Image (cartoon, grey):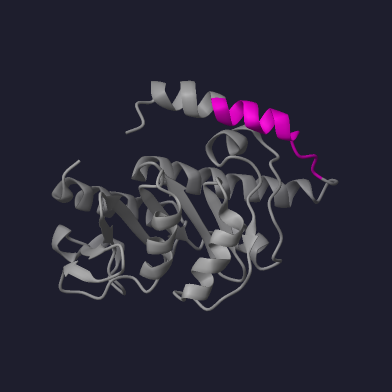
């Protein structure tokens, strides 16, 4: 995908996370990696008003290559994740209600449903609290990320990863669904997580069969 097409896709999913209630106002941010460049949403501009020219292009060390706006304050977090995980090509940071509700308790979400196991890769860990946009927050995320596609951010929100923006958006949706189910289930009893071997089996099916059929880029 070329840069101009990727800019338009970032804007599309920015509007989708707003429409889906995963963010409010100008909160949250989206980025995509194209080779050694990071394309990221600017700080403080409403998603519905974004144009391709507003998307900021940076190098992997957070230096601005192209753009007239300040990149999202979470750029250092995105950059460190891209350096840590070569398979990740898109990152979406959200403040969705149910995921944030669990994040403020600083608890993990166990692998309780199959689609969570498949697309996220199992339990969603909660990273320790650090001030937004700091290298400390990035370090705390990497400390628990491993091969998972989602991490809760204590007292903040969540971050979702994917091999492209479509997959990262799907992770956002599955994460919020899983968080809601977990909260509701705790009102009835203690949710029973899937066995590790079942999680690994479903993740393998997703990566090697299901997502290929979906033509993941």
Q: Point out the stretch of residues depicted in magenta.
A: 191-204
Q: Where residue 146 sits: x, y (%)?
A: 57, 50
Image quarter hosting the N terminus: top left
Asked where in the image residue 47 lies, by quadrant, the reply is bottom left
| Residue nearest the viewer, comparing 107 with 98 | 107
Residue 119 drawn above or below residue 13: above
Looking at the image, residue 88 lies above or below residue 99: above
Instruction: Mark yes or no: residue 213 visible.
Output: yes
Q: Position of residue 13 (x, y in %)?
A: 33, 50
Q: Position of residue 185 (x, y in %)?
A: 76, 46
Residue 26 in sight from this viewpoint = no
Query: Magenta region, mostly helix, strand or loop?
Result: helix
- Residue at point 49%, 29% (across, down): 207
For the point 17% across and 46% down, the residue is 5
Whether 217 is among the magenta residues is no
Q: Is residue 75 left or right of residue 42?
A: right
207 on left or right of 15 = right
Q: From the viewer's perspective, is 48 left or right of 204?
A: left
Q: Position of residue 96 (x, y in %)?
A: 53, 59
How many numbered marks are there? 0
Magenta region includes residue 197: yes
Q: Residue furthest right?
A: 189
Closest to the observer: 8 or 162?
162
- Residue closest to the eye, 40 or 189: 40
> Which residue is at a point 84% across and 46% down the rendered structure image?
190
User: For residue 52, what is the image quadrant?
Assistant: bottom left
């Amino acid at each position: 995908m070329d840069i101009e097409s990727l800019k338009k896709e970032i804007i599309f999913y920015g509007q989708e996370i707003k429409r889906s209630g995963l963010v409010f106002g100008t909160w949250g941010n989206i980025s995509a990696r194209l080779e050694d460049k990071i394309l990221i949403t600017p700080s403080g501009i409403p998603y519905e008003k974004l144009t391709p020219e507003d998307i900021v292009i940076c190098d992997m060390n957070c230096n601005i290559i192209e753009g007239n706006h300040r990149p999202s304050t979470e750029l250092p977090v995105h950059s460190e994740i891209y350096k840590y995980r070569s398979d990740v090509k898109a990152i979406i940071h959200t403040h969705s209600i149910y995921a944030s509700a669990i994040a403020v308790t600083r608890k993990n979400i166990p692998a309780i449903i199959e689609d969570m196991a498949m697309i996220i890769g199992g339990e969603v860990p909660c990273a320790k609290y650090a001030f937004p946009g700091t290298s400390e927050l990035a370090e705390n995320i990497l400390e628990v990320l491993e091969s998972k596609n989602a991490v809760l951010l204590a007292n903040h929100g969540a971050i979702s990863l994917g091999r492209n923006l479509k997959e990262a958006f799907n992770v956002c949706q599955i994460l919020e669904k899983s968080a809601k189910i977990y909260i509701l289930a705790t009102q009835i009893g203690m949710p029973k997580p899937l066995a590790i071997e079942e999680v690994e089996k479903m993740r393998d099916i997703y990566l090697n069969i299901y997502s290929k059929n979906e033509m993941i880029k």
